[in-house]
Amino acid sequence: MIKESNSSNGLTFAEFKKHFPYSEDALYALLFSRNQALIGIRREKFAVRNLKKIFRATFKLVPKIGFQAMSLRDLLSETGLSMGGVYLTITNKENIAIIVKDAVTLVCDDIVRSAREEADPGKALECLVKGYLFASLLLQPWFYFLYFETRSLPQTHQNDSKSLERAQATELEQLIRELQKKPNNGYPPEFIATMALSMIQERYLKPWKYKQPAQSVDDYANNCLQLIHRSFR
């Protein structure tokens, strides 16, 4: 589980990254165990190896051509796997999108659990904002894909993806409502929560904008939190 820092300065990106439990191999192993019905290979070692190649190729191709346009031939060329290797690992192209949704959901649920363990609502808000921000940067291709390719999911999974974003906003809104000193003045909590989530999404949706950032990720996170707090004083 993702943990908050005990430092008086709050959680830093470096600390978060150091203890992030979803590094690449660990994440693929988890996804293999959670999605057995979607993966044809039964041996974890080979499944993880192939999943890594398939998802790396997908994340490289999709921003250029879109998921709907991505063909099996494109995957074969980019991964170097045989047709059998691709089909045995991912039995259907839409399963790629389903597994991405599962990965993002897994991480976001973990962040929420960590935030709910904080007795102080201010600390819980920091845990949510920094958790969502830092995790979405470490897993940027996954979050980016789900944001733009939710439409590629089967309908029930599309609903799950949309519900995930609504749940993120609701968690933020509840803490903001609790922290507001004058709830009848200023901006509505649901509006502040929506703006907070938009600031978080900005960072992983526009990586080109932050390749040479004027501020560090930590500065960005702290500025987001300061703006949120100022909006309901």
Image: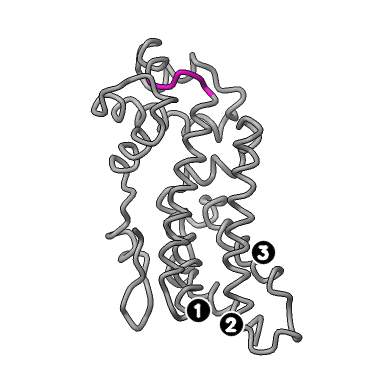
Hey, what amino acid is under mark 1? Answer: Pro
As measured in the structure, the alpha-carbon distance from the residue carrying label 1 to the one carrying label 2 is: 7 Å
Say few, some or many: other residues with alpha carbon within 10 Å of mark 1 (under 14 / 14 to 19 / 20 or more): some
Say which residue label 2 marks: 179
- In the rendered image, the vertical position of residue 110 relative to residue 58, given as above or below: below
Relative to 17, say whether 224 is above or below: below
Quadrant where the C terminus lies?
A: bottom right
Of pointers 1 and 2, the one earlier in the residue sequence = 1
Name the residue carrying label 1: 121
Disc 3 on helix, strand or loop?
Answer: helix
What residue is pinned by disc 3?
Answer: 194
Q: Are marks 1 and 2 in contact (CB under 8 Å)?
A: yes
Q: Residue at x 63, y 35 (%)?
A: 156
Q: Could you tell me which secondary element the residue under label 1 belongs to?
A: helix
12 or 104, which lies in front? 104
| Magenta residue span | 89-93
- The reply to whether dot 3 and dot 1 touch (C-beta < 8 Å) is no
- The residue lying at 47 percent from left, 34 percent from top is 99
